[in-house]
Amino acid sequence: MNNASLELNIVALAPAASMVIFALLVMAVDVFARGTRTQPVRAATPWVALLGVLVTAGVCVWLLGQPVTTFQGMAILDRYSLGIAFVVLVAAGLSILVSARYIPRVNAQVGEYYALILLISAGMMMMGAATDLIVVFLALETFSLGLYILAGLRRSDAMSSEAAMKYFLLGAFASGFFVYGAALVYGATGATQFEQIAAMATNPATDLTFIYPGIALLIVGFGFKVSLVPFHMWTPDVYQGAPTPVTAFMSAATKAAAFAAFYRVFLVALPSQQAVWGPALATLAVLTMTLGNLAALRQSSLKRLLAYSSISHAGYILVGLAAGSIAGVEASLFYLLSYAFMNIGAFAVVTLLEKQGEMDADGARLRGLGQRKPLLAAVMAIFMFSLAGVPPFAGFFAKFFVFAAAVQGGMSWLAAIAMLNSAIGAYYYLRVTVVMYFNAPDAETVSEVKSNWPLNVGIGVALAFTILLGVFPSLWTTLMESGVVTALALR
Amino acid sequence: MPELPIPIPPLPTLHESVFMAIALLTVVGAFLVVAARNLFHNALGLALTFFGVAGVYFVAEAEFVGVAQVLVYVGAISTLITFAIMLTRGMMYGATSPLNRQAGTAAIIAATVFVVMAGLLGSLPWPVAEEPIVDGQIVIANLGVGFVTEFVVAFLLLAVLLLVALAGAIVLAQDRK
Amino acid sequence: MDWLNLLVIPIIRSVVIIVVLLTGFAYLTWYERKLLARFHVRYGPNRAGPKGLLQPIADAVKAVFKEEIIPGHVDKVVYLLAPALALAPALLIWAVIPLGKDFPAVADVPIGFLWILAIAGVESYGVILAGWSSNNNYSLLGALRSSAQMISYEIPLGLFLVSILLLAGDFSLVNLVEAPRAWWEWLWLWIMFPLFFICILAETNRSPFDLPETENELVAGFQTEYGGIKFALFFMAEYISMITTSAIMATLFFGGYALPFGIGSDILPILGPFILAGKVIVLLFLFIWVRASLGRPRYDQLMGFAWRTLLPISLGYMIITALLTVFFK
């Protein structure tokens, strides 16, 4: 306990801290500004939350200019953690916009909802910033716990409750795997800080017997959170049962957060064992892409379709990690950001197709959307094209960078399989478009599409960036490039 | 005195016998958790297991961790579990089978994991502490200092985690309007 | 030597403490009945022996010789376990209570404080098990009430204990008694004592917070199905809990085995246990006084008081204590 060596750089925690402060503010607004029954001031809570997201984004932009700082070796502020923070902020901001008119229909507890979104985001940012297994675990639990609750937000609905219960039970189980894995890695190396683990793991005097089961269990724990096959079983049910804005947030932000820590643990703490985990992750990536895409082919519910699509996207992102290179990390970061825009955009469109009191939309409801709502159909088509990886949208470059990284990393076979999978994926994404434009509207399935301005703003922003990142991918890559190099230079 | 064909193993020391008794208690509790047919008995088994684990901490001279274990797991978590069971009467008195059709597979997997882990644990040379801890106060003080220095990030994050839990409890528990 | 130090001596000391406690319990019932009689302007027990002093012995003999009945509808193992589990925590706490300068606690562990908190948390098990295993609606309701009440009051109790801990700066109860304190510390402690005492009343299920065992609504609550010596065990648990908590309060608030202003303790260390006993008797009087004077609140009032009044107060108290400790010590 040497006090002289303390490095308490609060600045390293600033993004997460800012989110927590705004979460408290949201709760305070909710309690103290109740208003009257007819004029509820509580409607202010989403805007306070959104302000929190914007302020935090501002803080992050300011931090981009700061040097890399560490906090006691437990957390770090570098370009990588800021990149993850940006992805999480995008997901949180868009979800808040989508939720603004949606959530009051589902649950009266409006204030806590936005507070939880912000607190979860704080936990997710810590996933990106953590450089210690203990902090990773706590951050993991923080955001998971919040998501269990958000999944079951609609308490009177059996599907929502089932989603929450399933997510909670399996999630708790997966956390158990993670902790066990972390404990074994600690047992083998005697350290929880990534750099110390890396140092011990390369030290020939260390007995590494336990590190292998440890790595396996860590993969299971992370694999559950990012829904890798075979740990994906919960994904379709939870995505379908949760309120749609929550699903949107979950799909984009959880992936970013879990992949963030996944990458840092394996690339910073365990690079010496890459011969062990590299092939394992490549296998998982193949399984995940293939199974996710094949299952998605058979879905009729839009939310389940997007759930399986999200599984396959986890597979694509994992290709970047399996490549094990800096290019792979950069590519994955870009992928996560693009995915946040296009996927939340797609879910936002789904909310418009749901009937009152429903929480899912059948694919059949898309029939003839091209004639009824040409603009909406066009937007949906763009999101689908982007998810499929068609240029000139963000999804194209996301896939391109990841596959290029795999080829550079000497994993051309993996890139080939991934490309094959993109082709399968394109089928079901394009089918959505076909249904919208070439099927006549069915009288029974015509739904009243009611729009609202926060949602429109959300969709607009998502759309703008899906196109912008597709046309100028350098916007993001130049912002992040130098940073990722510094982050991994630590090892 | 004639040489015995098999050397008599040394009698366990007091420390060892206490540990064995506690370990046995823990295992019995764990067995009750999975095998008892009544949900309430499962919950009591869990409490027993937690108590046993606390006992192991005491034997290892980690009194602080042991007492924290009793305080949190036996005193709070298990009590709340039994409380929840008592509030759902349908589950209370019925006997449910602890086995489902996956029991066989699960047993095989569990047995494999046990054998592998036990084999690994047994094969390693474990470091032995040189001397017992003399002053427990210093250990606790160091723990406290650690929370606000070395592990302050974890400590802060824990506060956020609990805040999430509290807000979540409100969302789940508040009256429907 | 190992066996002697680790096993034989502690066992002898434990047995002595338990015997003293059991006698204390027996005469506490006599003390309570006599005192209640005084409050009611009656005589109280006065037939068995002079001043009714043999009454507890007569009661004990009666309880032991009652027929052993186990109702057919109970969960037998748990039913029999419950009274034992009710009694054990009250005795276990004595492991850490210092009895005098030459009579340290049986286990003078460095975590005496936490031990008290931990065991207080386990105390509700006896009641829960009794209520559940009795398979009887009234018992179940009583047990639910009891555990809810104990859990709720444990929180402010714990926070108050943490505050005392902050002032003491030490987990050991022996050091707590021995360490000198400034006058404002005593004052600040005593301000909190009434609230602490309220928590203790609720924790021990004593009147006026004896809602788990109300005769008129719940037919004695969780004890309904218990008779004979098993009922006596519950009774014993409650009364020994009173003695135990009084001893805790005496140690935390009133200097434990030491006389005020350090008088005499160095001259006659043998007096320690007796001084502690004297303080305990005074505190027990408080328990009985409250019982004779106050009526029961409604259950929702009881719970509301814990969560809406005591919890904020205890939190505030803790914060102020922390500040006082930082700035004045």
Image: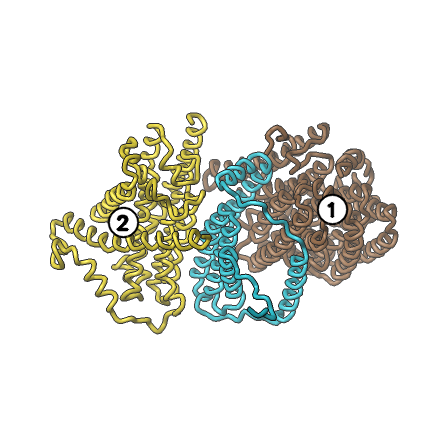
Chain colours: A brown, B cyan, C yellow
Task: Say what secondary structure mark 1 lies in.
Answer: loop
Q: Which residue is mark 2?
A: C208
Q: Would residue A487 be found to the left or right of residue B77 on screen? A: right
Question: On screen, A284 above or below A134?
Answer: below
Q: Chain of mark 2?
A: C
Residue A488 placed where, x, y %?
Answer: 77, 38
Q: Would residue C206 be found to the left or right of residue A100 on screen? A: left
Question: On screen, A165 above or below C170?
Answer: below
Q: Quadrant of residue A427?
A: bottom right
User: Which is closer to the viewer, label 2 or label 1?
Assistant: 1
Task: Estimate how packed mark 2 is, as few (under 14), some (14 to 19) or many (20 or more) residues with alpha carbons within 10 Å.
Answer: some
| Residue with the most extreme front position | B1
Residue B134 placed where, x, y %?
Answer: 50, 42
Residue C114 placed where, x, y %?
Answer: 43, 45
Residue C49 placed where, x, y %?
Answer: 13, 57
Task: Estimate how packed mark 1 is, as few (under 14), some (14 to 19) or many (20 or more) residues with alpha carbons within 10 Å.
Answer: few
Q: Is residue A318 visible?
A: yes
> Residue drawn 41% across and 31% down?
C320
Residue in the foreground of this view, choosing between A417 and A412: A412
Whether callout 2 and callout 1 share a subunit is answered: no
Q: Are marks 2 and 1 in contact (CB under 8 Å)?
A: no
Q: Is residue A355 visible?
A: no
Q: Would residue A475 be found to the left or right of residue C56 on screen? A: right
Three-letter code, disc 1? Ala
> Residue drawn 12% across and 55% down?
C50
Residue C54 disc label: none
* Quarter of the picture holding the C terminus of chain C: top left
Q: Quadrant of residue A445?
A: bottom right
> Residue drawn 64% across and 63% down?
B114
Q: Which residue is mark 1?
A: A205
